[in-house]
Structure formats: C-alpha cells, structure tokens
Amino acid sequence: MKKLLIIGLTFCTLNVFAQSKTESIKGNDTNYKYRVSFPAIILANIGDGGKRTNTEHIELHLKRELDSKNIIGVKLATWRLFQPMGIQWWDGLLDKIDSESEFYPGYVRETGVGISYQRMLWKGLFASVEVLPQYKTYLDLNNEKIANGFKLYTSYHVGYHIAFGKKKRIFIEPQIHAQNWMFDTNTPDGFKQLDNKWKSYFLFEPNLYVGIKF
C-alpha cells in the first residue's frame, strides 16, 4: 500500500510541473473520438510476485467521446483483496496493513465488466461515475477456492484531464475517488466477520490515470 501511495503521489507531483506546459482538453478537440486508459497504481504490482499485500490489480478503460462534454466507456477490472476495503484512512489503514491485524483468512478475487460516464465541467475539470458488477471468488491462503459471490461496486470521481504532445493524444487524469458497494453476497463467515467491522464504502482515494486517444 505504501508503494502504491508513493507512485500515485509521485505522478501527481509531476502533473503540477507538467501542467504549465500542457493544454487542457478543448471543446473543439474532436479529432480522436476514442481513448484507452489505465490507473497508474497497477504498476506497483510489478515485481511483488507472491507478496501477501499484492492486489494483482489489472484495470482498463475503453471510452468514446459523444461530444466535447460527454464521454461514455467500458471498464474491465480484476483485483485481489487481502483485507476489507472499508477501512478508512483515519481508521489507521496503513497501520493495519503493517500489523496484519485485519487480514482475511485468505483472499477475495473480484472481476467484472462495467460502464462509465464522464462529464467535462470546465476546461479539463471533470466528474465521472463508474458501475462495476463483480464476480467474487474466495480463496484460502493456498489459493484453493472456498466460495463464489457477487458484488455491485460503484465509484465516483473528480479529476482533471491534461493532454500532452502536438496532437494532444497522450493524457493523464489526476483524480480522487469515493466508492461504495451495495450488494455483496455469499461471503464466508471468516471474511464476513471482518467486513462487518468496517464500512461498505471508502473515501478519498487518490489516483492517476494514463491514456491515449485514437
């Protein structure tokens, strides 16, 4: 987790210096209707191999501009949880990772295909919402399957679109998220006891998306 935060904060810092040399998305920037992007935090999984806290996070977004203000997309994502998602920063999230006090008796693999809507508000400022139905697989510490379940995961984003290059095809989107999950079914007891101690939402997650238009 610390590695994820360092990478995220590093990219966001670079954005501040880069912003003065780039232009935000323009209302008439319609040469490229499609875009693909991914969150930079997934790069932190590289090289961690079988580490207990490796989320094995893979995420890809495919989007299309309907016009200069409205963008729709498809989200493909999979990740592996080692503790409840509802532990907030002020609950001592990082300390609990270090102490391993809230670790599951195994893992939860969550995989889904969802949809997204992004609305450009002012210059590069945007707000977006993503809805991701997820198929859950519960695993023990030996990666043997225990049970399957379902979760409806939604996230809400506010960020800024910054485009680079002569044709503005490369872009980054520093942003902050809030997410919640309403339906979460068939959770084994050992996992459910931990989930019930915490919230069914998470607030103020910083992130950075990197993408290209085509």
Image: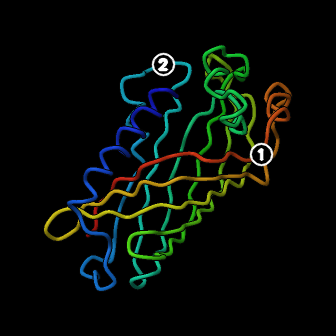
189 left or right of 113 in image: right
Residue 84 placement (x, y as % from top left): 71, 33
Task: Place residue 27 in its image quadrant.
Answer: bottom left
Residue 45 placement (x, y as % from top left): 42, 31
Disc 1 and disc 2: Cα gap in Å?
27 Å
Q: Is residue 7 above or below residue 151?
A: above
Q: Which structural element holds mark 2? A: loop
Q: Is residue 188 above or below residue 64?
A: above
Label 1 sits on residue? 200
Q: Residue furthest top?
A: 99
Please report whichever mark, 1 or 2, sits nearer to the chain's N-terminal start.
Answer: 2
Q: Residue furthest left?
A: 166
Mark number displayed over residue 56: none
Mark number displayed over residue 50: 2
Q: Nearer the viewer, residue 203 or 77?
A: 203
Mark 1 belongs to which amino acid? Ser
